[in-house]
Amino acid sequence: MKSAAPTRAHLGSGATAKPRRGFIAGPIYDSLFFIGSPLLALVLGIWIADSPLRTTTLEIGEYSDSPAGLFIGSFIMAHLVLVFFRSHANATIFKTFPLRFTLIPALLFGGILLSDWVMVATSVVATWWDVYHSSLQTFGLGRIYDAKAGNDARVGRRLDYLLNILLYTGPILAGATLFDHVEDFSEFDQLDDVVAVFFSSVPARVEGFEETLTWLVVGIGVPFLAYYVGAYIRYARQGYKVSTQKVALYVLTGLCSIFTWGFNSFGEAFFIMNFFHALQYFALVWWMERDNMTRTMRTPRRWLTLVVFLGFGFSYGLWAELLDGDVRWAMAIVSVVSIMHFWYDGFIWSVRRRQV
């Protein structure tokens, strides 16, 4: 397992300025919305576990769920649609990849409308892409903190990438929520062909390998963590400046992931992990795009931009959460927004990095 072989010059040749003492926005903003959000989500999840917010049932038309379920479902859907403020509402980004922002979503929407295979496959892919995407969001925040500390962007990048994949997928594969993730494959039951039967049997196949997966994750994860710590000790001796913000973010995220995905003691793993991920994304998009959104919307005050930003996100989120699952065109919209969120956000990071 190799990372960049740093020299002393590399390790100290990052950003020349250190605004806000290594924070992205500032100590309070970062501590609440980025670094401390996993802990906040964990406390909130434990608090609502046996409260009326979880035990009460809301019925709105055909929709039936608890108030907590309605909130987290809407919150998840709301954060997904915010990517369009970074793609379509940002003229500089949009003109870089116009076909990706127009033709591809149109083709996917048409495919979902016309093909049951595309519809089901998109749903299953979205479940696992979400896990990968969430790990990369934490990875990206950590790398920003490294840059803020003055470190070279290449140092430890691969190690951080692998660490975040492990922190998210490891507790899922070895923990109590594994079947919550693989059960989506059962949607292939509605497709009548041999290939669909193979995919629909995945949950049953996984059940037979549950213990093997646990030992595999432990067998890979523990040595990797030891290697990761040792590598950064070597980097520090060569001039790497440890970012306390990055360390705190990774530690809190890892502990939260292990406790919730791995054990799900309070039955709120889905709420907890999705809450802090969506909260981070809301805060990140607002901080990075607030000036661009104000110019694009031509709002006279930034607080009005914030109202529009939040109003648009939560309006879509509530609509998407309450929609009738039998309305295919509406489900196609939701699926397209989800997949485009995962895809767009990945390469927009790279584009923005080159611009900066």
Image (tube, grey):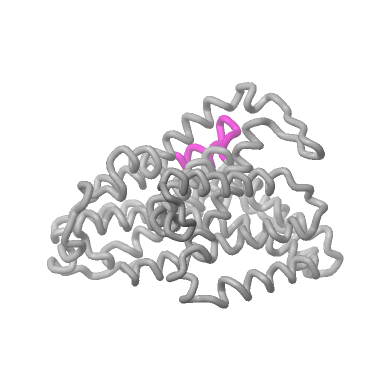
Instruction: Please indicate, yes or no, whether residue 218 appears anywhere in the rendered image.
Output: no
Q: Quadrant of the N terminus?
A: bottom left
Judged from this view, the residue extending furthest toward the front is 300
Depth check: give the residue in front, 258 or 214: 258
Q: Is residue 12 magenta?
A: no
Q: Quadrant of residue 123?
A: bottom right
Instruction: Please indicate, yes or no, whether residue 295 appears anywhere in the rendered image.
Output: yes
Is the stretch drawn in magenta largely helix, strand or loop?
Answer: helix
At x 44%, y 34%, the residue is 40
Depth check: give the residue in front, 183 or 312: 312
At x 63%, y 26%, the residue is 53
Residue 265, compared with residue 226, is above or below; it is above
- Residue 149: x and y, percent? 21, 54
Residue 261, compared with residue 110, is above or below; it is above
- Residue 295: x and y, percent? 42, 59
Residue 111, compared with residue 59, is above or below; it is below
- Residue 343: x and y, percent? 54, 65
- In the picture, measured across the screen, residue 82 lies left or right of residue 252, that is right
- In the picture, measured across the screen, residue 341 lies left or right of residue 234, that is right
At x 62%, y 45%, the residue is 315
**Figure label count:** 0
Q: Is residue 262 magenta?
A: yes
Q: Write down the region rendered in magenta.
A: 256-269
- Residue 195: x and y, percent? 78, 69
At x 74%, y 70%, the residue is 110
Q: Quadrant of the C terminus?
A: bottom left
- In the picture, measured across the screen, residue 212 lies left or right of residue 296, that is right
